[in-house]
Image: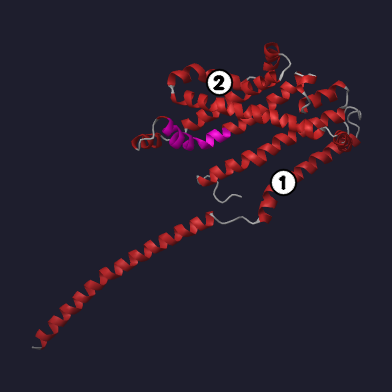
Amino acid sequence: MASTDTEPGTRTDRASDGAAAPADGGQEAAGDLAGLEAGLDALESHTAARVPVSEILRSKVLPPLLAVVLVLGLWQLAFALHLKEPHQLPSPLMVWDALAEEWYKGTILQIIWQSISRGALGFLVAVALGTPLGLLVARVRPVRAAIGPILSGLQSLPSVAWVPAAIIWFGLTDATIYAVVLLGAVPSIANGLVSGVDRIQPLHLRAGKVIGATGLRGVRHVLLPAALPGYISGLKQGWAFSWRSLMAAELIATSPELGAGLGQLLETGRAFQDMPLVLGAILLILLVGIGIELLLFAPVERRVLRNRGLLGNAP
């Protein structure tokens, strides 16, 4: 009887142990899953963490300032050592005085605005022409075979080479300047978009067709968003070519009817052998180009890349 009484109890204990084992295994699996979710949450929160302002100033602002100070110091040193005559290599202060004189004349802002407005208008027209051209070259094989090499050749052609031809075609008018800008910028924008489309995974395009995003809807909702990083790079390069082309056109095609621009200011300094004015005009051209890049294109590109997880937590 004793053995009979203890046997069911033993079986009961074994059954309870067997039932506890799966429960413990389930709890362990749940714990592992919770740990994995917590780890993913930690990664996401680390990526979204805001960078302190002091870190941004140290990494983004301080290096350019130090570079500018170094360049100015070397420039002043070269002037002090008389490596060139003062009329050939003026000091930074002499260049500042030349720009200050133009400021006091009340013409410098008008000159800068004239060039910026021309460059902006030319760039917008180049975007309107280069975007459909790039899509056509990227998606139609015969068009790519016929036009693709021509676009690459036009992109490598110096913009100044178009100035004499544009003067003959349009005379000393604004049409000459805009023609040079377009011929310099359109190939860069089109090639940038072609490069962006070529990097799209075929799976994305097939998925777009499955959900009915074809034709213009496919271009708007699938093709352009997927090619956006390459397209923005093409826009940045297109603006650089627009600005360079504009300066080349303004430098050569000078006329009272065309008004004043930074290129004309540079040519005026050359004509009067005014080296401080020449260097001042060069600095203004450089500052405007860098300013447009930093204030407009760099934030847009950084935001697009960050949204796609390509920048991490970079400031």
Number of residues whose C-alpha sits closer than 10 Å to that of mark 2, classed few (under 14), some (14–19) or many (20 or more) = many
Q: Position of residue 96 (x, y in %)?
A: 86, 37
Residue 123 seen in render: yes
Disc number placed over residue 63 in the picture, else none: 1
N-terminal of the pair, mark 2 or mark 1, is 1
Disc number placed over residue 151 in the picture, else none: 2
Q: Position of residue 228 (x, y in %)?
A: 51, 36
Q: Residue at x 60, y 22 (%)?
A: 155
**Does the magenta segment cover residue 311?**
no
Left or right? Give the position of 17 relative to 44. Answer: left
Q: Position of residue 240 (x, y in %)?
A: 65, 30
Disc 2 secondary structure class: helix
In the depicted view, which residue is nearer to us: 114 or 51? 114
**Does the magenta segment cover residue 226?**
yes
In the depicted view, which residue is nearer to us: 254 or 27? 254
Magenta region, main secondary structure: helix
Q: Residue at x 56, y 57 (%)?
A: 49
Q: Residue at x 66, y 20 (%)?
A: 180
The span shown in magenta is 216-233
Residue 200 seen in render: no
126 to 7, vertically: above or below: above
Q: Position of residue 193 (x, y in %)?
A: 52, 30
In the picture, the quarter occupied by the N terminus is bottom left
Q: CA distance from mark 2 to mark 1?
A: 37 Å
Q: Residue at x 53, y 37 (%)?
A: 229
